[in-house]
Image: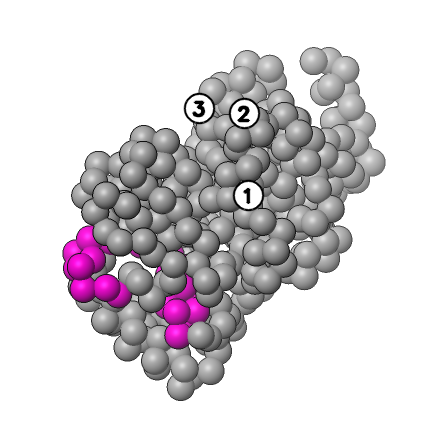
Amino acid sequence: MRLRLSYMTIALMVVGVHFCSPKKNELNLFIWSEYIPESVIRRFETESGIRVNVANYTSNEEMLAKIQAGGSVFDLAVPSEYFIGILLSEDAIDPFPKEALKNFGNLAPEFLNRGFDPGNQYTIPFMAGHGVLVYDSAKTPPMKSYRDLWRADLRNNIVVLDDIRATLGMVSRSLGYSWNEKDVSRLKEVGTAFKALVPNIKKFDSDSPKKLLIDGEVKAGFVWAAEAALAMKERLSLRAVIPEEGMYLWLDSFVLLKGAENPGNALEFVDFILRPDIGRDIALAYPYMTPNREAKKLLPKEMLSNTAIYPPDSEIQKSDFFEELGETLRVYDAIWTDAKR
């Protein structure tokens, strides 16, 4: 451990700024729920002597509100790709000295140097994925399109993500429009279609939508792919589908929050997460796509062949990441709030 800590200390001295402040034995992590197994947290604490305090959020918007309200309470957060520009405009994050991460090279090139953060100046990729349709084949006919969610037999019988961009993006795609639609007249149609979908929605749930599917409380849903994969293990009649309209991709990354009190510990934690064995353990517990190519090599073949988790390259190539919407986000907010009343 002394050699590893010595390496980290030297690396921090090289990159400079305020990362050489005296080390405190804690780290404040702000992250989505069900994203890092408790066993991984405990292993890091044992190896490093650093206590990890974990707080959760259910949306990027909630994360920002709590960061703004709490100042420098948190050290690390894990926002989605489209939210990086917003955090930068709010001066909420610091540059991430990736030179201090000896395991940075484990990350696959296709997840690096994306348009939302050229050169990965601020972000370290952690988890990637997409949304899928999932349905109970014992209770409802097969589904192949987002439009199937509006079927009459699904009244009060679907779960959808409590995520404004994912769910309204899905509604937009059901109409043949973009995941990042900005045309006001088209968004009016999206609002009307979303209102028509609400009677079918039993619950909005981004934390653990798999529970309703496993318990048979709903017949179908639009959920994270990993949630679908976990649910399918428990309820064998469930089926996951990449809809004919295509899917969107998301990429959640570690960011160093402005004014973090424990930046050195944050870097040590991220470097730990980038280890192949740790990346494997996280991917096995929460089966999203891992951007860690060395961890991916350690995953079982049946997992890698599961298209609910790792879609075919042909699907990935025609998929989109979310983009920052600017002032158009206000229109999305209005549609979302009005329909959910």
Query: Closest to the observer: 186 or 132?
Result: 132
Residue 217 rendering spot, x and y as whole percentages: 19, 43
- Disc assigned to residue 147: none
- Residue at x 59%, y 62% (from the top left corner): 318
Q: Viewer-nearest of labels 1 and 2?
A: 1
- Disc assigned to residue 310: 1
Q: Amino acid at mark 2?
A: Asp
Q: Amino acid at mark 3?
A: Glu
- Residue at x 34%, y 56% (from the top left corner): 143
- Disc assigned to residue 38: 3
Query: Closest to the observer: 322 or 38?
Result: 322
Q: Viewer-nearest of labels 3 and 1?
A: 1
Q: CA distance from mark 3 to mark 1?
A: 24 Å
Q: CA distance from mark 1 to mark 2?
A: 17 Å
Among numbered discs 1 and 2, the one appearing first in the sequence = 2
For disc 2, the marked residue is 281
- Residue at x 78%, y 23% (from the top left corner): 7
**Dot 2 surroundings within 10 Å: few (below 14), some, or many (20 or more)?**
some
Magenta span: 150-175
Horizontal side of residue 30 vs 333, given as left or right: right
Q: How many marks?
A: 3
Horizontal side of residue 189 vs 94, given as left or right: left
Q: CA distance from mark 3 to mark 2?
A: 11 Å
Q: Is residue 271 visible?
A: no
